[in-house]
Amino acid sequence: MDWTLLFQLVLNGLIVGTLYGVVGMSFVLVYKASQVVNFAQGEFLLIGAWVCWWLLTQWQLPFWAGFLLTLAFMTVFGIVLQVVVLRPLIGEPVISVIMATIGLSIFFQALMKWMFGVFAQPFPPIFPADRVEIFGLQVQTAYLLSLGISIVIMAGFAWFFTASKHGLAMRATAFDQQVAQSLGVSVPKVFAMSWAISAMVSAVAGVVVGVVNGASSGLSAYGIKVFPAVILGGLDSIVGAVLGGLIVGVLENLAQYLDAQWLNWGNMVQVAPFYALILILLVKPYGLFGTRNIERV
Amino acid sequence: MTPAGDFRTSYRADMTIFPTRGSRVALWIGLALACAAPLVLDRYALGLAINIGIMGIAALGLNILVGFTGQISIGHAAFFGFGAFASAGLVEHGVPVVLAIPLAGLATTLVGLVFGLPAARLKGLYLAIATLAAQFILEDFFARAQWFSGGVAGRVTEPFTLGPLRFDTENSYFYVVLAAVIVMFVAAANLMRTRDGRALVAIRDHYLSAEMMGINLAWYRTLSFGIASFYAGIAGALYAHYLLFVSVEAFNILFSIQFLGMVIIGGLGSIMGSLLGAAFMVLLPEVVQTLVELLQGGAIDRALHLGNGVAFLKEMAIGAAIILFLVFEPDGLARRWRLIKAYWKLYPFSY
């Protein structure tokens, strides 16, 4: 047994898990508000990271300015996407909506490859020290930052949904669209807002991963990894998404540990979450915190 | 020409696939033209036609699942790939290719049923995610299972033979695919006229009502998954013996999405549409390629570096086509085709 490796992997798992949690949260946000399963969530990370990279390297902006501009761009992008592509599909069967987001996903993946190439591009160095040591374990500075940002985002979500007017409107819409509408909530605005927030928050995660590993087309894989996380937590539970993200992050790193120590199958880190996903769907399809759909005729 | 009004007096007449003499004549002329195609077309065009046929069979299977039963699968390429590897593997163990193709179809059905078991309990969205997992698990399995897929190196296989005849050129293999297309499409058209086929449609339209009318939901959902996998397996096997080489990386998620795109573009719940959608998806990259070549050297090419990005432009075209069809023509090419027929039926008095 290699305890240091195990601890390192669990720590990595928790850190990556918070990122999955953040992406999962923004996924659940869109699902709750507008009943759209967004297969293009990973592309939000991808686009966010590339835009930030472009601003930092081509325009030589300082990190904070580039970061804020990226967030502003992603907000607009999310709204435009919702208005142009998803609004015409309201009321269409679930397969059409899923397919539209899948179409968006391949479109933007290919567009990003075309514009920025297929190779990973490093971000300019942002922190003086690349990694710090905590209890004898090496941790990337950017990951610490990401942990901080993730916790801030989660706290922000909690405040937004319990105290702010728009957050309450969004919850009302998720609960019952017609009732919300009759109480004066503008449902189209809520839809657009949920997409804007989702795109922006995912872009934060994208930039953080980009700072650590460089911006690359591999970022869209986060959009796929988010499915095990949100299914585990329950599709319509924000708390569940965070918890599911953490569990999936730790799980895939433990799978890698098992693999490296004993099994030597290779690639377990990629596939283990999907085995878990099938199991969850068989045993408890509504996840840990999801609402069980009761059929009424 | 259909007469105004409905003069059918028996169920038999009501259920017929080709209701008018015109449609039957068109069918035979179409078949004759298809048979004569290798005499006229060059190898490249024939290769495209073969691809359309193979993809059409796989798309038809997916359409039975998605369009007729209302279940979603994002793992169709993995089953397609399983059929290809299974057939290649069987041939390696001395099974003649003629037998290996249907056997590969059956093997794929079994695998499909295993992954379709969740389908008995899940629907819509949850099933889509389960099949997404199946896609990644099977892809990983292909990459790892050296004995099954030849690992990273891929697997070389034999051409289709029947007695002394060898179907190893585009000209000859075209007839194999044509025969398979006819058999599989006739089978599907007939399936939809049976009790089982109508049960699938009933589940799509309203599963609670269907259950109340005595349709076993779990059984039919799983069955539909099995049929879809069978079609994918057969198409995959045909693909393997056309290319004579199967490699792991071909059967990725983009390929699965292309199958879904074919079904959407062709028209959900349309047998003819599956073939139209497959033709659209196979020809779309060719059109993009031609456009890029036309623009070569021009100002647009220099500004956007089109030449280097052809591969990405093709992927973008697929994504854009799916979205545009969903927004502007949700019923797909099959509906467009019906409109064209309706227009010419009363020409020139289209009112």
Image (cartoon, grey):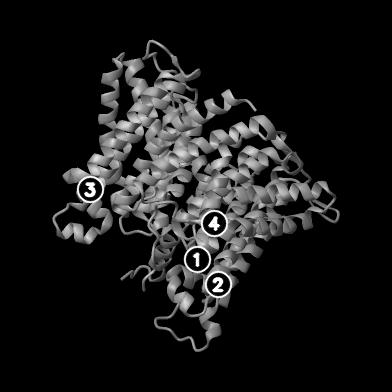
Q: Are marks 3 and 1 in contact (CB under 8 Å)?
A: no
Q: Is residue B155 above or below residue B112?
A: above
Q: Are marks 2 and 1 in contact (CB under 8 Å)?
A: yes
Query: CA–CA distance between discs 2 and 3?
Result: 42 Å
Q: Quadrant of the C terminus of chain B?
A: bottom left
The residue singled out by tag 2 in the image is: B197
**Disc ID at residue A282:** 4
Dots 4 and 1 on the same chain: no
Per the image, label 1 sits on a secondary structure element best described as helix
Label 2 crowd bin: few (<14), some (14–19), many (20+), radius 10 Å: some
Q: Amino acid at mark 1?
A: Phe
Per the image, label 2 sits on a secondary structure element best described as helix
Label 1 crowd bin: few (<14), some (14–19), many (20+), radius 10 Å: many
Per the image, label 3 sits on a secondary structure element best described as helix
Q: What's the chain of the residue with tag 1?
A: B
Dots 4 and 3 on the same chain: yes
Depth check: give the residue in front, A112 or A55.
A55
Residue B222 visible = yes
Label 3 crowd bin: few (<14), some (14–19), many (20+), radius 10 Å: many
Q: Amino acid at mark 4?
A: Leu
The residue singled out by tag 3 in the image is: A190
Query: Would you identify the image quadrant in which residue A282 lies?
Result: bottom right
Say left or right for B326 vs A79: right
- Picture coordinates of residue B175, whole percent (x, y): 70, 55
Q: Amino acid at mark 3?
A: Val
Q: Residue at x 54, y 66 (%)?
A: B221
The residue singled out by tag 1 in the image is: B68
Q: What's the chain of the residue with tag 4?
A: A
Mark nearer the viewer, 3 or 1: 3
Q: Are marks 2 and 3 in contact (CB under 8 Å)?
A: no
- Picture coordinates of residue A168, whole percent (x, y): 20, 49
Mark nearer the viewer, 2 or 3: 3
